Image (spheres, helix red, strand yellow):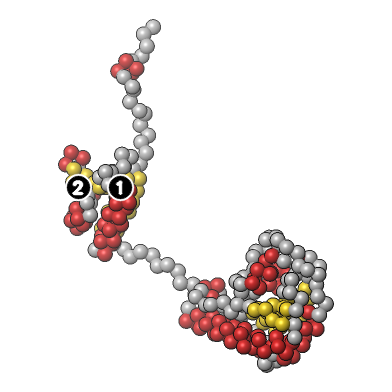
Amino acid sequence: MPPAPHTLPQESMPPARTDLSDFARALAARLPGSWSSDYQRHARYEEQFPRTEQLWDNGHVAHIVSQYVLSHDAILHGPEGHRLFIADRPHHCDQFVAASFEPVEDGIKPHHFVGVEEPHGIAIPNDPARAAARIAQRVLPRYERAVESVFDNAATLPDSPHRPAPPQVAHVLTLTLYDDGALGAPYDSVPEQARGTLFACGFQYLPHQAALLLSAQYSENDRSLRVQAAARLLTAQGIGVNLRHVAPTTAAPPPASPQAARSPRR
């Protein structure tokens, strides 16, 4: 798809070819089904945005739209709401480009395009008969398959699939990252069902600190793997796991020496 309207073009389009309007009409008359042509000139760069912001292409047609000032273009309207974008191909006076537009029917939302392969545009010769044959063979089949996939997504998943909230758990373990690099929790705050798992993942019980801790001597990568393993195993047991940093201390630091703590003598 083309960039947001504030994106500036990097190159100027070569002088507009006068035959685009006639070519688009002749092309519409030769495509299968009933097609009509809507030709428009653009006095300013911004005027092309309403015509190109729904372009269904992330290849060279999108590149042209994003990098060049289009002084004119044409939109072909066909059966079942199909639309094709026709424009000059820069530096190729014997060619145009053709690409499709995204469907805009009611009920079509952004998540319906997820996983759908874009029906990329192509270069076409400036001969209407040959161009129509190439579009019928290479563009329209991909376009119709993509539109069908979008409509299928809209029918099966009308609303965006929001992520579900986590299930309620009976026990929660909060692991704390301490300032000295140790990670763990006070022993009494660790659910009894979680203690064996923590021991198996390398946590140790330190009686003098009354805590289960993962030593800071482990490398950062090793510690991350052990914490991930513990969280995965505990989650599978229905135990929630939180990770927090130790609360910053607000107490005033102790004096550097007993003498510094005394009031100076007068």
User: Which residue appears at 80% of the width and 83% of the height?
Assistant: 22
Residue 219 shows which numbered tag?
A: 1
* Label 1 environment density (alpha carbons within 10 Å; few <14, some 14–19, many ≥20): few
Residue toward you, 218 or 250: 218
> Which type of secondary structure does the marked residue at label 2 adopt?
strand
- The quadrant of the picture occupied by the N terminus is bottom right
| Residue at x 36%, y 14% (from the top left corner) | 263
Identity of the residue drawn at 81% across and 70% down:
15
Which residue occupies the extreme right position in the image?
18
Tell me the element at label 1: loop
Residue 259 lies in quadrant: top left
Return the x and y of residue 82 as percentages of the image width and height.
Answer: 65, 84
Residue 196 in picture, x, y percent from top left: 18, 56
Q: Position of residue 155 (x, y in %)?
A: 50, 83
Say if residue 139 shows up in the picture. yes
- Dot 1 amino acid type: Ser
| Residue sitting nearer the eye, 111 or 247 | 111
Vertical comparison of 132 with 89: above or below: below
Q: Nearer the viewer, mark 2 or mark 1?
A: 1
The residue that mark 2 highlights is 204
* Quadrant the C terminus occupies: top left
Asked whether residue 42 appears in the rendered view, the answer is no
The answer for how far apart the CA atoms under marks 2 and 1 are is: 16 Å
**Numbered label tally:** 2
Q: Of label 2 and label 1, which has the lower sequence position?
A: 2
Tell me where residue 130 appears, x and y as whole percent: 70, 88
Quadrant for residue 260, please give it: top left
Q: Amino acid at mark 2?
A: Gln
Q: Is residue 74 above or below residue 194?
A: below
Q: Residue at x 64, y 88 (%)?
A: 136
